[in-house]
Image: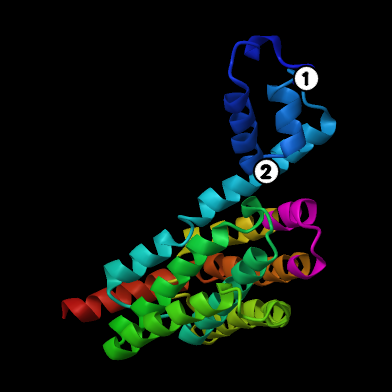
Amino acid sequence: MANINPLLQHVPEEIVNETVRLCGVLFDDGCCSEFIQKLNIPGEKCLHMFMIKLLGYGIILMGSIVKLPQVLKIFGAKSGVGLSLFGVLLELMAITFTASYSFRNNFPMSAWGECIALGAETALIAYMILWYDGHKAGALSFLLMYTGIIYALTHPLFPKDLVWYLQSSVVYLAVSGKLMQALKNYKAQHTGQLSALSAWAIFAGSLARILTTIKETGDLLTTITFICSSCSNAVIATQVLWYWKSTQAFMEKGKKKKAN
């Protein structure tokens, strides 16, 4: 092994290679080799890629919990009032198509990994809206159908070209889903059980994802999707603040009705 790190001269080559391989799973192979095997300080390119990767993994971490406040809020109230079921389903389709497209194109996990958690959380929200609205059979049927869709989209026999066409519709699905929610908020003049924390965290995450998508995949279709998604997320996040007082008044009114 040429130019090996002197500190690793007595370490079996298999262990060194495996360490580089594991490092390469998270970061760039060439950068890992330079640093671990040759003890060279990473150059500007490697440091830049390292920061982009860290940002991507940070988004995944945030994405795994970003909708939990929304889930807990619905669970606590035993109601999904104020949330647009159709909007949630459109958003779920957009997330699912993006995840399957990224998976089938072997994009780095750091560029799309949060879609897995977001998909699960959004599906749970749709299930809870149906369940608490009294449609228990529909809620269970929805989960079974969604599981089948995921299996089909990720299966090698499912046409890859069709996955691309589905991804091209994500812009319309994501924006339409958010606009449906925004319209419902506007008509009601409150945001109901919509979580402010989730709304703003999703907006921040979609903004950061634009940068990581450009740097890690260079895929124009996915980049446009996240740009449009960020714009529609901004509308929802703004509405949460705009209707804050009226939402609090609406919730207090609901509590008084239950008490009586």
Q: Nearer the viewer, residue 80 or 56?
A: 56
Residue 53's tag is 2
**Image mark count:** 2
Binning the other alpha carbons within 10 Å of mark 2 as few (below 14), some (14 to 19) or many (20 upward) gives: many
Amino acid type, residue under disc 1 in the picture = Asn
Where does residue 13 sit, x and y in percent of width and height?
63, 23
Name the residue type under label 2: Lys
Q: Nearer the viewer, residue 101 or 184?
A: 101
In percent of width and height, residue 256 lies at 23, 76
Q: Residue at x 66, y 65 (%)?
A: 102
Q: Which secondary structure is most common in the magenta stretch?
A: helix
Quadrant that contains the C terminus: bottom left
Picture coordinates of residue 169 (x, y %)?
70, 82
Element type at marker 2? helix
Residue of label 1: 40
Decide if residue 229 is on the left or right side of residue 252. Answer: right
Residue 3 seen from this side = yes
Dot 1 falls on a residue whose secondary structure is: loop
Residue at image coords 38%, 66%: 71
User: Dot 1: few (<14), some (14–19), or many (≥20) neighbours within 10 Å?
Assistant: some
Which quadrant holds residue 247?
A: bottom left
Residue 97 is covered by the magenta coloring: no
Question: From which residue to which does the magenta span run?
Answer: 209-222
Q: Is residue 221 magenta?
A: yes
Of tags 1 and 2, the one toward the viewer is 1
In three-dimensional space, the C-alpha distance between marks 1 and 2, rounded to whole angstroms, equals 20 Å
Q: Earlier in the sequence, mark 1 or mark 2?
A: 1
Quarter of the image with the N terminus is top right
Front residue of 5/197: it is 5
Q: Is residue 80 visible?
A: no
Dividing the picture into quarters, in which one does residue 202 lie? bottom right
